[in-house]
Amino acid sequence: SYFCERDISDSLNKQIAMTRKIALIAGLFVFIFMPMQAARKLTKISFDKLTYDFGTIYEKDGNATCTFRFVNEGKTPLVILRAQASCGCTVPSYPEYPIAPGDTAEMKVEYRTRHRPGEFSKYIFVYSNTKPDRTTLQIKGVVIPDNGGNSTKPSTRNYRSGELRTRTVSE
């Protein structure tokens, strides 16, 4: 009976030691990965508008730029991870630093009008530490083409998006 009690006691001590090891590992896991979770905390972004309409713009006036203002409405810093346009003719620029809760910042979007006559509608996908993690912005308008300097008045023909424009060149 002495040996049975000793075997049970040894077995119980091993179980207690194993439980302590598991608790220690779990505690270390929480301690190590908790700061990583804090870095992933989500916040809320609110834009003053989701669509900007340039209206009618003239190719001869050069690139068109607009500004989207936004505020961090969350309780943790807002980080814009990237902003990606649907086309190479659209170039977004954004703050590359964290926006504190309650602070306002701006995203500028440039539309390159050269050789792009007619209506346009482009999208900017803004990725950040928010839920959902993507916000979609839109710019749109109509580009009146430059008529090559043949007249003091620009052409007012409305070209459809993607339509090719031809011009006769004289020597």
Image (cartoon, rainbow, N blue to C red):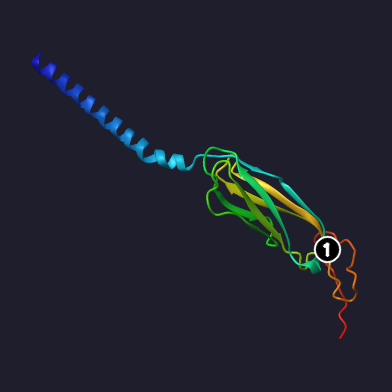
- Viewer-proximal residue among 9 and 39: 39
> In front: 19, or 52?
52
Q: Residue furthest left?
A: 2
Q: Name the residue tied to disc 1.
A: 163
Residue 141 shown left or right of residue 79 in the figure:
right
Q: Local crowd at mark 1 within 10 Å, few (<14), some, or many (≥20)?
A: few
| Drawn side of residue 35 relative to residue 109, left or right | left
Outermost residue, front direction? 103
* x 88%, y 61%: residue: 158
Quarter of the view holding residue 32: top left
Q: Position of residue 126 (x, y in %)?
A: 62, 49
Quick check: 171 above or below 74? below
Q: Residue at x 88, y 68 (%)?
A: 154
95 or 80: nearer the viewer: 95
The percent coordinates of residue 31 (x first, y second) are 35, 37
> Which amino acid, by three-letter code, is at mark 1?
Glu
